[in-house]
Image: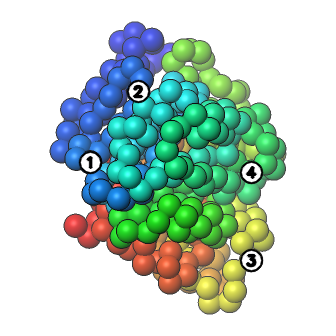
Amino acid sequence: MKKIINDVEDVLTESLNGFALSHSDILKVNLNPNFITRAKKSKAGKVSLISGGGSGHEPLHGGFVGFGMLDAACPGQIFTSPTPDQMIAASEAVDNGGGILFIVKNYSGDLMNFEMASEMLGMENMTVLVNDDVAVEDSTYTTGRRGVAGTMIVEKVIGSAAEAGASLAQCKELGDHTNKMIASMGIAFTSCTVPAAGKPTFEIAHDEMEIGVGIHGEPGRKREKAKRADEIARDLVDTILEDLKPDNNAEVLLHINGFGGTPLMELYLLFNSAANELEKYKVKIGRSLVGNYTTSLEMAGASITICTLDDTILKHWDSPVHTAALRWGM
């Protein structure tokens, strides 16, 4: 195992320290328990948005703490859910009197611990569950569809609404609606290596690809020989649109997400292939985002996320945001 680390047990703490130092104008990090908050607390009465999950998916979620998105994020150990005490401490730190909205990816550990925190929390709170992955219904980590790269879109849309003064119930309703408008699916060419394990999570031949892989390296629908980009885009886009069933001339947000080990050159190439595929369906690309936003350490591969846009989602996607990983319009 070759990684830029010191001691395996200190990876998360030292990474969080570096993250805080490099973005001190936007956020701050609390240790023991671990959580990330905005550098300056948001306005009184605003709904506070909190998300989190296992580390190793950076910039999700800490990279989206800031104006127009999250108030706090709770990072667990690598690929391990954060604990209820992290979520409760984060909630108490960012409470503005408008209630707490948890944004949770559909994984068993995340769901269980956020539910425990919700029940123990002495303030009004609600939860939005993200389950955008159309690859499989059940996997190693979850029952039902997994929450993957579409989580970032949900966080951005709700974050804008909360910033504009939406109530807790309105933020939840918008989050649930946005989640239903999103579908994702990914492929992987390699595994990743969790530092504590010291070896790849799964074995895959040099000429194979996993179709529908999860962001922890969970198996997907099937394993096949590696394909051309156009064929990958066709398989993923066709499956996604079968789920979304957009109208002709529908406008969408097309997000090509890298898993950490794929060059941007290849991600943009995949965007081109996906755009060509969408054109066959008479689906229009209204907004786009390409890059590493929901990663799996150094796994080579990518996912395609499509969000059907309506006036409300479009308005909140376009609104100003200023975080470590996403910023525009300020």
Q: Which residue is mark 3?
A: 245
Give the mark nearest the N terminus, 4 or 1.
1
Q: Position of residue 12 (x, y in %)?
A: 41, 23
Residue at screen point 65% across, 25% down? 201
Left or right placement of residue 152 versus residue 281 in this view:
left
Q: Are marks 4 and 1 in contact (CB under 8 Å)?
A: no
Q: What is the CA distance from the residue labelled 2 to the residue labelled 4?
A: 27 Å
Quadrant (top left/top right/bottom left/bottom right) for the C terminus: bottom left
Q: Are marks 1 and 3 in contact (CB under 8 Å)?
A: no
| Numbered tag placed on residue 34 in the rendering | 2
Q: Are marks 3 and 4 in contact (CB under 8 Å)?
A: no
Q: Which residue is mark 1?
A: 41
Q: Amino acid at mark 4?
A: Arg
Q: Residue extending furthest front?
A: 122
Q: Position of residue 9 (x, y in %)?
A: 45, 11
Q: Quadrant of residue 138?
A: top right
Left or right placement of residue 164 versus residue 199 in this view:
left
Colour mapping: rainbow
- Closest to the camera, between mark 2 and mark 4, is 2
Provide the secondary structure element on which disc 2 rests: loop
